[in-house]
Image: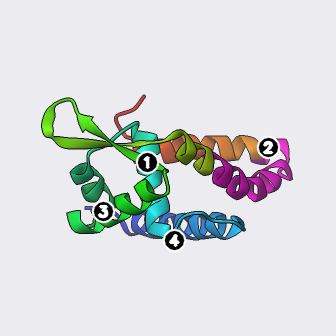
Amino acid sequence: MTDATSRVLATDLSVLATRLTRWLRAADDAPSLSGPEASAMAVVIHSNGINPSQLAQYEQVRRPTITRTIDSLVDRDFVRRDPDPTDRRGTIIQATAAGREMWNAGQARRIEPLAERVSALNMVERRQLEQALLLLEKLVNPNKE
């Protein structure tokens, strides 16, 4: 059972993470993707290929929903379906070069305002931020060393 202070910290962290994500998304003045498409695209890029069922599970949507999202990304040449080497009937969703280029350009637009604010921090604050990032990584990946 967790203590009350831990629950308050967890709630505050969750709210802040949501606010940060929304602020970064709003910083992109030329988004190419809807929110669900951007989320799925991030998973595809960072997974270096994923099957549709895994993607649906990761995105917490049903298979028909992720299929529509994948179709939209395929139609715009942001992802492609490759044969799954372990399942003759399956596919692996991979980012295309155009998809990576689009993603990287959008990331640059979203990150710049945050980078400007980070650059305004003094050295002590930057070190504190670095330590906080290490703690956040530990929370998200407790088995990673």
**Mark 2 residue type:** Val
Instruction: Say whether disc 2 or disc 1 marks the residue closer to the N-terminus.
Output: 1
Are dots 2 and 3 in contact, CB under 8 Å?
A: no
Residue 50, disc: none
Q: Which residue is mark 2?
A: 124
Q: Quadrant of residue 21?
A: bottom right
Are dots 2 and 1 in contact, CB under 8 Å?
A: no
Circle 4 — which element?
A: helix
Are dots 4 and 1 in contact, CB under 8 Å?
A: no
Q: Quadrant of residue 4?
A: bottom left
Q: Which residue is mark 4?
A: 15
Q: Which residue is mark 3?
A: 66
In the displayed structure image, the side of residue 104 where residue 72 appears, left or right: left
Counting from the top left corner in percent of width and height, residue 72 is at 41, 63
Counting from the top left corner in percent of width and height, residue 121 is at 83, 51
Mark 4 vs mark 1, CA separation in Å: 31 Å
**Mark 3 residue type:** Ile
Instruction: Say whether disc 4 or disc 3 marks the residue closer to the N-terminus.
Output: 4
Write the start and end of the magenta stretch as one range.
Answer: 104-125
Mark 4 vs mark 2, CA separation in Å: 25 Å
Q: Which residue is mark 1?
A: 79
Instruction: Confirm whether the magenta stretch covers residue 133.
Output: no
Instruction: Say whether disc 4 or disc 1 marks the residue closer to the N-terminus.
Output: 4
Instruction: Say whether disc 1 or disc 3 marks the residue closer to the N-terminus.
Output: 3
Q: Quadrant location of the N terminus?
A: bottom left
Q: Residue at x 80, y 56 (%)?
A: 117
Instruction: Say whether disc 4 or disc 2 marks the residue closer to the N-terminus.
Output: 4
As rendered, which of 74 and 36 lies closer to the eye?
74
Marks 2, 3: nearer the viewer: 3
